[in-house]
Image (spheres, rainbow, N blue to C red):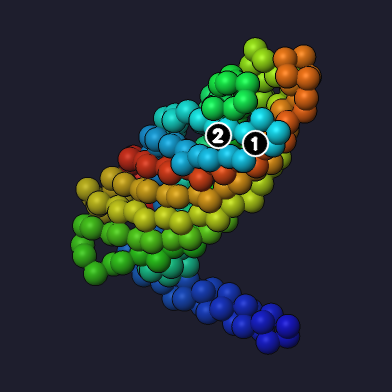
Amino acid sequence: MKNLILSALLIMASFSLATAQESNSSSFNPWQFRLRAVVVSPDESASIGTIGGDVDISTTVIPELDITYFFTRNWAAELILGTTKHKVEATNTAAGNIDLGDVWLLPPTLTLQYHLTKWEKFKPYIGAGVNYTIFYNADEGPVADKVEYDNAFGFATQLGLDYMISDKWFINLDIKKIFLQTDVTVNANTALGATVPADVDINPWLIGLGIGVKL
């Protein structure tokens, strides 16, 4: 445990030293911001207790803001911010298809990235990190009395490309996959005479295109 803590402290110290050295160069900008239009496409599946079936979650398009801090010219951390609303339907259940209304998701995601810098204009990068999704303002739809979603952690992977159009401004293409699972409870006593639990894998793809600036 002591060795693990010491290793983490040494890595942090190395990043801090590298950042200080890079900052001495007038051309190094540690902060950058992107604004993207993002298609959120769930790769969904579900295990629905007692009534069986699957789930269908709608695809949406949202604005997304991200903030990136470069420790060095290659290594960076990115915080991704956005919120999205999805329609939810239980399909092929013992009671047929069930409209479960809609729900809002707030999924802040933090990734650690490695950026390739060998080209002047093309700046590809790869990243991985953690996501925490908060479900809120759930509308249960016309059948259920109440639908509850558990907030959940997920793992995120990322692949992207910045194309420089000036020293500060760039165009960005970004693809993320979030591995996200939540436990859902559907209280449908009025329609089905039961409370139905479900294990739902959302696993969305996030495909974004936008513009960014280095500060």
Residue highlighted by disc 1: 48
Q: Say whether residue 132 is left or right of residue 43.
A: right
Work out whether 28 lies above or below 4.
above
| SS under mark 2 | strand
Give the residue at x 44% y 30%: 59
Residue extending furthest bottom?
3
Give the residue at x 54% y 73%: 16
Q: Nearer the viewer, residue 133 or 25?
A: 133
Q: Position of residue 201 (x, y in %)?
A: 57, 44
Give the residue at x 33% y 40%: 209
Indicate the quadrant containing the N terminus: top left, top right, bottom left or bottom right.
bottom right
Q: Is residue 73 visible?
A: yes
Q: Is residue 88 visible?
A: no
The tag earlier along the polypeptide, 1 or 2, is 1
Residue highlighted by disc 2: 54
Question: What's under tag 1, amino acid-wise?
Answer: Ile
Question: What's under tag 2, amino acid-wise?
Answer: Asp
Q: Position of residue 93 (x, y in %)?
A: 59, 27
- Give the image quarter of residue 29: bottom left
